[in-house]
Amino acid sequence: MEGVRRVVRQPDEAAEGGQMVFFADVEPAAADRLVEEIHAMGIAADDYLLTKIEVVAPQRRHLSGQGGIDGFAWVEVMGQARANSRPLARYLALINVAAVIAALGVIVSSGILIVGAMAVSPDLLPICATCVGLVGGRRALAARAFATLTIGMVWVVLTAAVLSALLKWAGFLPDGFQVEDSSLHTLAHLDYSTVLVAAAAGIAAMLSFETGAAAAVGVAISVTTIPASAYLGVAIGGGGIDKALGAVVVLAVNVALLLATGSLTLLAQRYLPNRSGAPV
């Protein structure tokens, strides 16, 4: 196959019956076709493994512009999406930590705490997994990932509400506390900047999904989800819910734009010509 090079055959010493093991370098653009051919041969999924190799020293054709090291392999993206589409215990734990930090940030009007909460939040993963499911036509995957994202946002609201109520009951919040008194009251207001930030964040999310930049970009993604969710939770538990309902609109618009621009970016990555030459 084109895109498959350096095929090596070795005897499988651990098996009986003269079975062989094959190794090869596969360019990312050819990975999807290779998997289809392997399935057509009747080879089970447990009998082969694709591992991505990070290229350090560039080959000559990379320098000449004929290839790159950031190839797009749909099979890789789909595998990551499946792994990130479920509300695992670690996901819920990180969401809970982010909710506590963000709620305290809203209460004490601390932008630093809000940024810290965004750094902890793992909501980038189900957002991107939802986009993969939508673009790939995998409705079950998209629904499962979106449900995971929804559970996370609801969890943030509930945690922030409970924390605010406990602080109010313990006397740590002043009498007559209203969430709009916080300097972060803009979290409940929708304007053009909110729309532009969410649209740009969706593009960044998908571009970083299969790279090491995902952790850093996740902070930017969470600016559209965690603060508004925590603001709403503080309003419910601490006071001022009538002034905070706009946070629901902000959150809904942000999530919709994240999914829209993320899906469009993935479509472009999947269907535009791929000239990468990195081995898989």
Image (tube, rainbow, N blue to C red):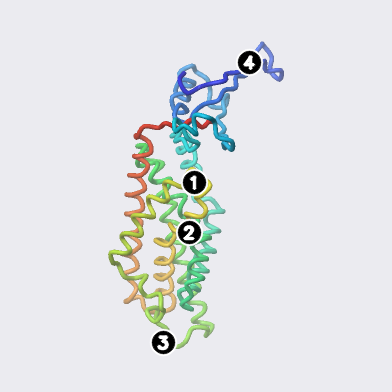
Where residue 279 appears, as percent x and y from the top left, is 53, 30
Where residue 203 appears, as percent x and y from the top left, is 38, 50
In the picture provided, is 255 more to the left or to the right than 35?
Answer: left
Badges 4 and 1: C-beta atoms under 8 Å apart? no
Please report the residue visible at 57 percent of the width from the left and 23 percent of the height from the top: 24
Q: Is residue 54 above or below residue 14?
A: below
Instruction: Tell me the tag on residue 84.
Output: 1
Instruction: Tell me the tag on residue 219.
Output: 2
Mark 4 surroundings: few (<14), some (14-19) or many (≥20) residues within 10 A: few
Please report the residue visible at 55 percent of the width from the left and 25 percent of the height from the top: 25
Badges 2 and 3: C-beta atoms under 8 Å apart? no
Instruction: Tell me the tag on residue 176.
Output: 3
Say which element carries label 3: loop
Mark 2 surroundings: few (<14), some (14-19) or many (≥20) residues within 10 A: many
Q: CA distance from mark 3 to mark 1?
A: 42 Å
* Nearest to viewer (mark 4 / mark 2): 2
Q: CA distance from mark 2 to mark 3?
A: 33 Å
Where residue 68 appears, as percent x and y from the top left, is 47, 35
Q: Amino acid at mark 3?
A: Gly
* Nearest to viewer (mark 4 / mark 1): 4
Q: CA distance from mark 4 to mark 1?
A: 34 Å
